[in-house]
Amino acid sequence: MKSGRGALTALHLFLVWATTAAVVPALGYGLVLTAWGGGTGAAVPVLALGVPLLVGLLAIAGIPARTVVPLCGSAPRRLGWAVLIFLLGTLGVLAGLAAYGGDVDLGSAGTRIALTGAPYAVAAALFVPSRWVRLGALAALAAAVAYGGFVGPAQAQQRRHEADVARYREKPELLDLGAAPPGMQVSHAVVGPASFSVDYRPVREGYELGYVGLVVRSPLTPAPRCPEPADKGVTCTVDAHGGMRTVRRLPREVTLVRRYRNVEVEVTSQTLDESGLRHLLDTLHPLSDTELAELMREKKIDHGV
């Protein structure tokens, strides 16, 4: 491409980009505001005025390229070219909005406004009769598709994952987990503002019965103590180490409470005996990153209120 034609082509693409980067965001904001205030019907007049205005401005932006782009050689053909650029570029803008709605990072507000004109400039470049300009436009289109369809969503998913991990780790002193009793597994865990609860159920749930509940919380009292007066049908004792044991006769249910570091841990079950509950308490350990990742991957952990 000769230098004179190259300069005209560059000016042409710049004018297309500058025009659409200035008008399209303003038109979009106008549509949103009128629809918000008066409903969809109120946005129709804005669209009816804005679209012809943008097409007309694109046709004007194509005037310097009338000797470079064949479709811009005459006023009627230039108007048809402007309509094509508007349609193709708007498809690109809508794709960008869909990606942004999917939490794909498109930079700051200023960057997003600048990017609004890019699809129109790429569309205009496809009509320039130059192999290198068209190859550049196709490369830009491929890069946008790769980022918006694959790289960006993967990064967004990673950011969401890291944000979820940070939320779960807000109070790491509560995130203690015990080894699942034989034949059981963690079925659900809930991270609350002042507690961490875990449900253990049989691996073959539906075929076998069983349940163990673990609750790690900030201490409710200076030391575990039996309620007074004692509940009927409930036996409660506190050992020399401060551990509390509660047994309800009907239905039989065993509950053990123990201090662990700076938290209070409670385990309870109607199916697991006292030795099994004590073993679970003895295996308490801080929830590892691997265990947390597995719970998140299997959707077995939630935030509580």
Image (tube, rainbow, N blue to C red):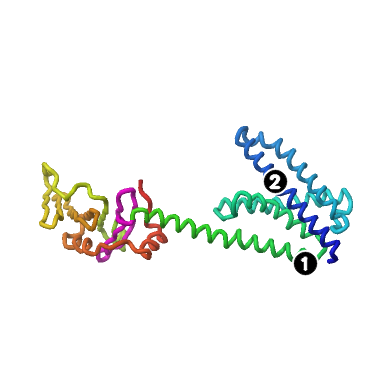
Q: Does the magenta run of residues contain 161?
A: no
Q: Position of residue 117 (x, y in %)?
A: 70, 52
**Disc sitting over residue 73 in the figure:** none
Q: Quadrant of residue 69?
A: bottom right
Which span of residues is magenta-colored?
172-198
Among the two numbered marks 2 and 1 on one chain, the one whose residue lies closer to the N terminus: 2
Q: Residue at x 21, y 57 (%)?
A: 271
Tell me the distance, in whole angstroms, between the alpha carbons under discs 2 and 1.
28 Å
179 is higher (above) or lower (below) than 23: below
Q: Position of residue 249 (x, y in %)?
A: 13, 50
| Amino acid type shown at disc 2 | Val
Q: Position of residue 137 (x, y in %)?
A: 73, 62
| Amino acid type shown at disc 1 | Trp
Counting other residues with Cα less than 10 Å from the Cα at mark 1, is it few (<14), some (14-19), or many (20 or more)?
Answer: few
Secondary structure beneath label 1: helix
Task: Return the residue at label 1.
Answer: 132
Task: Return the residue at label 2.
Answer: 24
